Each structure stands twice: as C-alpha cells, then as structure tokens.
Image: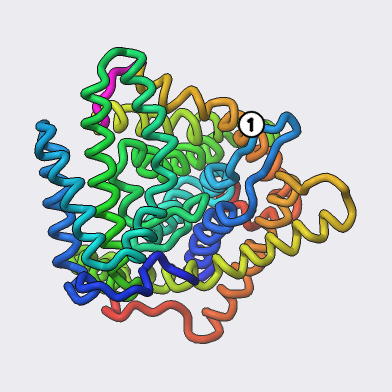
Amino acid sequence: MISLTSPIKTPFHKIPAGVKLGLLSLFTASLFLSETLTMHVGAVALTVAFYLIGGVAFAKSGFKMLKPLWPFLAIIMLWHVVTDTTPAGVLITLKLVAAVGMANLVTMTTRLDEMIVVLEWLMTPLRKLGVRTGAVSIAIALVVRFTPVLAQKATYLGQSWKARSPKRAGWRIVAPFALLAIDDAEHVAEALRARGGIRDETGA
Amino acid sequence: MERNLVLVALFAALIAALGLIPRITLGSGIPITAQSMGIMLCGTVLGARRGALAVLLFLGLVALGLPLLAGGRGGLGVFTTPWAGFLFGFPVAAYVTGMVVERVRTGNLNMVAAIASVVGGIGGLYLVAIPYYMIMKPAGLTEALVTAMAPFMPGDLIKAVLAGLITAAIYKARPSAVLSRA
C-alpha cells in the first residue's frame, strides 16, 4: 500500500524517527501553550521554511496534504467573523496550519517501517507487563495487506451492482462486503493456525 | 486466538476500505462517508472490547502514516487538530455500541444494533469529540455544537439506521461471526 512518505528525499529523512517525533511533540505542545501572534506567525514561518528545505516540489505536495483542512478553517473563520472575534480566529487558523503542517512533515519524511520500530519500542513497557505485543505486529501486517484486497473486492461488488442496476450501489453493498471480509478472516485464521498459530516472541 | 485477532484486523481493514470506496450518496443527495458506519459496525458485530481494538488498530496505522481516513487523509497531522476528538472518540464509540448490543439480548438485532449505534456511534462519539473541541480550539459549548456537531448529525442518524440493517443481514448470513451475540 502507498503510505504518505514522500518519495522526494529531504535532509529530514535522515533524522531518526524517534527524534523527529520527540521534537514534534515539543513543538506542538509549546504551540498550543503560546498565545501571542508573533509566536504563531513564527511557527508558521518555521514550518514553511522546513518544507522549502525539501525543495519546491516537496513543499507543494506538503501544501496539498493540508487541503482537507481549508473547509474547516473556513467554518472557524466564519464563526469568529460573525461573533466579532476575528483576531482569535486568525490565531487559531495560524496555530492549526503550523501544527498540522509540522506533523505532516514528520509523516512525509519517515518510512512506515521506521514508525513501526518506534511503536514497538513504545510498547516495551506493555510487553514487560505481560501484554502479547507480538500479536500487534501481526495485526498491523494483516491490515496493511488486507486494506487494498478489501478495497478491490468492494470495487468488484460495486461493478456487479452497476451491471444489474442503473442506480448507484450505495449502502446495500456494505453487508455483502462485510461478509466477504468475515469469510476472508475465517480463512486467514485457519491458515495461521495451520502454520503454528500466533506465537509471542517473549513466550509470555 | 487466531480467529479473534484476524477478525479484529480485518475489521480494521474494513473501516479503511470503507473510506477508500467512493462516497455513498443517499437518495436525497446527502453524501456520507461510510467510514464512521464502519466504526459502528465494529461495535455491533465484534462487540465492545474487540470492536474498540479494531478501531484502535485502524487509528494506529493512520498515525503511523497510512492514508486510511476517508478522502485519503492520514499521518500525524490529523491528530493535531481540534477535530481529532472525533478520532479519539472512535474507539469509545465502538466500545459503547458493542456494550449495548452485548447487554440487550432481547428484541430483534436490527433494532438493537441501530439503537446501540445511536447511543455509542453518536452519543459516545460526541461525548469525547465536543469537550475535546472545546478545550483544544478553545470554544464555548454553543460554538462547538454549531460548528462541530450540527453539520454531521443528519448523516450520523442515517448511518446508525443503516448499521442496524447491515448488522442484522450479517447475523442472518454468518451468525457465528457476530461476536457481540456469540
């Protein structure tokens, strides 16, 4: 499956994932604690500058990832204009652009496997408590593999519906779709059991 | 063990796939994404605990950087907005939905699952999402209700009804897979 990691290499790709995530947490926390306009403009400027280090094409794809945010920001601005609190609206808009932009930057410059390593490290205390974290890794692999498989099956279901009806399929294909997923699950579970089942690397 | 784990994983994939397929447009022309219906289905089919686990797994993969949210969104950025309360509310929604279906054993499943979806998928969800929005934005209650709840309410109610119908259909075809009633 295609992850959100950018194929355009930037210097940020070389920074260890854990360090990036730590710095991101610090950045986001201080952003949400600050209240001055200068801080907010500075945070947005820093975010834009970071994207530009990756080059114009990289910055453009980063900007594209912000697209779903605009309608929400429009609603917020509208509210603040109507209630006569425009400065507060500007502040929250800047805050969100910086926070989301910086978080996306980490996502765009970190590979999925690096993220999973950090996740596994974060789960270490759980493992010590006796939680079977090995199952989590298998579950992640299953989701990554089966999301495109199920999306494909949903497309086929939609096509066979269209072959019989001039109308769009709509919600009526969701039940047969869920049944396909359930049947797949039974088969995969059987296959896993046949291969020795899910063992935990800690033997817990 | 294997069966439950795989069902949880495949339902997480199901939520993702429901976000990838084109949006469902209802007769009246209201477009809704099927994804939050997937959250309700996790609860009604898998039950409270496993339903919530499937949703957590789904959210975990979104955070790791997979574009699994409806519209191909994903990554860490989606968790830093005031609307992230909806994401954090998803596992709660699935848990509460599942709990209602597990507790209410009488009556037909269609009805029970629809009501459970309203209680969990709407009640549970907004109970997390609205206070989160009020704190993170920050906003007053009226502002939160007007800008973050009202626009989604009609679609959510329709999804709850559909979740009931779909759950009953799944139970009819594969009763053993509906863990909330197993």
Identity, as a three-letter code, of the amino acid under mark 1: Ile
Residue A108 seen anywhere in this rendered image of the structure: yes
The quadrant where residue A31 appears: top left
- Nearer to us in this view, A178 or A151: A151
Q: Which chain does the residue under circle 1 lie in?
A: B
A41 sits left or right of B42 in the view? left
Residue occupying the far front of the picture: A56
- Residue at image x 13%, y 58%? A23
Q: Magenta stretch?
A: B137-142
- Nearer to us in this view, A43 or A179: A43
Q: Could you say where residue A72 lies in the image, as x and y percent from the top left?
A: 41, 34
* Overall secondary structure of the magenta section: loop
Near mark 1 (Cα within 10 A), the count class, few <14, some 14-19 or many ≥20, is some
- Residue at image x 39%, y 54%? A65
Residue B134 against residue A123 in the figure, above or below = above
A6 sits left or right of A46 in the view? right
- Residue at image x 35%, y 27%? A76
Residue that badge 1 annotates: B158
Classify the position of the C terminus of chain A by image quarter. bottom left
Residue occupying the far bottom of the picture: A195
- Residue at image x 75%, y 33%? B27
Residue B53 seen anywhere in this rendered image of the structure: no
